[in-house]
Image (cartoon, rainbow, N blue to C red):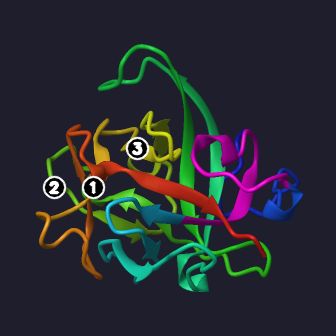
């Protein structure tokens, strides 16, 4: 049986055990769970930070070289195995993850996870914070964009849709711009950086 991301089991591994500082899918765990992550929107280089239960996720804190976001951006990512030929995806085998707010070191984990509201398949469905549940709308797949900067797409397993920063170009670079799911566009508002803290 796989461990839930909110269980601190023997497979947990601190970011301090990883070598190098990388971004993108190469930094994700291949077993158990790892902490000290934060996720940035590529369009605005802003961190996604924790929100109250049931609230839509948003980008808030601007990050630049040599600067990292506050602990409100802390994430622990849990490896949840692989799936072959899931609906809405190209044929192949994909690695699944749960994305949990908080950290193992110091221990700030809480029972709040990235979640597509109501397990919706709809365009524009909000990405919210919600307690752990055994459903595919809390499982995400990271895929390289192919850009040289190691940015990734974040796709929901249940819907196959892509997480994106909502709104037009006058909105989706702003502080407080919301996260939603959408069909593939390849636009920069669908691209993200998965980073590991240096401390």
Asked if the stretch drawn in magenta spans residue 86, the answer is no
Cα distance, mark 3 to mark 1?
10 Å
Q: Residue 5 bears which disc, if any? A: none
Q: Is residue 115 visible?
A: yes
For the residues bearing labels 1 and 2, Cβ distance under 8 angstroms: no
The crowd level at tag 3 (other Cα within 10 Å; few <14, some 14-19, many 20+) is: many
On screen, residue 161 above or below 46:
above
- The first of marks 3 and 2 along the sequence is 2
What's the residue at 79%, 61% (across, down)? 15
Query: Is 151 positioned to the left or the right of 196 in the image?
Result: left
Q: Which residue is mark 1?
A: 189
Quadrant position of residue 44: bottom left
* Position in image of residue 49 (x %, y %): 46, 77
Q: Residue 124 bears which disc, if any? A: 2
Q: How many marks?
A: 3
For the residues bearing labels 3 and 1, Cβ distance under 8 angstroms: no
For the residues bearing labels 3 and 2, Cβ distance under 8 angstroms: no
- The first of marks 3 and 1 along the sequence is 3
* Position in image of residue 13 (x %, y %): 83, 57
Start-end of magenta stretch: 18-38
Q: Which residue is mark 3?
A: 153
What's the residue at 52%, 75% (across, down)? 64
Cα distance, mark 3 to mark 2?
16 Å
Instruction: Tell me the quadrant of the picture where the N terminus can be found.
Output: top right
In front: label 3 or label 2: 3
The crowd level at tag 2 (other Cα within 10 Å; few <14, some 14-19, many 20+) is: some
Cα distance, mark 1 to mark 2?
13 Å
């Amino acid at each position: 049986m796989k461990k839930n991301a909110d269980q601190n089991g023997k497979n947990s591994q601190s970011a301090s055990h990883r070598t190098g500082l990388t971004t993108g899918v190469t930094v994700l765990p291949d077993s158990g769970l790892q902490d000290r992550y934060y996720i940035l929107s590529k369009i605005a280089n802003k961190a996604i930070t924790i929100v109250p239960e049931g609230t839509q996720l948003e980008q808030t804190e601007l990050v630049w070289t040599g600067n990292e976001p506050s602990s409100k951006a802390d994430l622990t990512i849990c490896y949840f195995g692989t799936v072959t030929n899931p609906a809405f995806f190209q044929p192949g085998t994909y690695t699944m993850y749960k994305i949990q707010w908080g950290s193992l070191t110091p221990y700030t984990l809480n029972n709040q996870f990235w979640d597509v509201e109501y397990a919706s398949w709809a365009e524009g469905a909000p990405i919210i914070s919600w307690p752990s549940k055994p459903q595919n709308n809390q499982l995400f797949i990271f895929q390289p964009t192919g850009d040289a900067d190691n940015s990734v797409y974040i796709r929901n397993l249940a819907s196959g849709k892509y997480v994106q920063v909502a709104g037009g170009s006058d909105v989706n670079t702003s502080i407080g711009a919301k996260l939603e799911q959408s069909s593939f566009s390849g636009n920069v508002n669908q691209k993200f950086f998965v980073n590991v803290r240096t401390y």
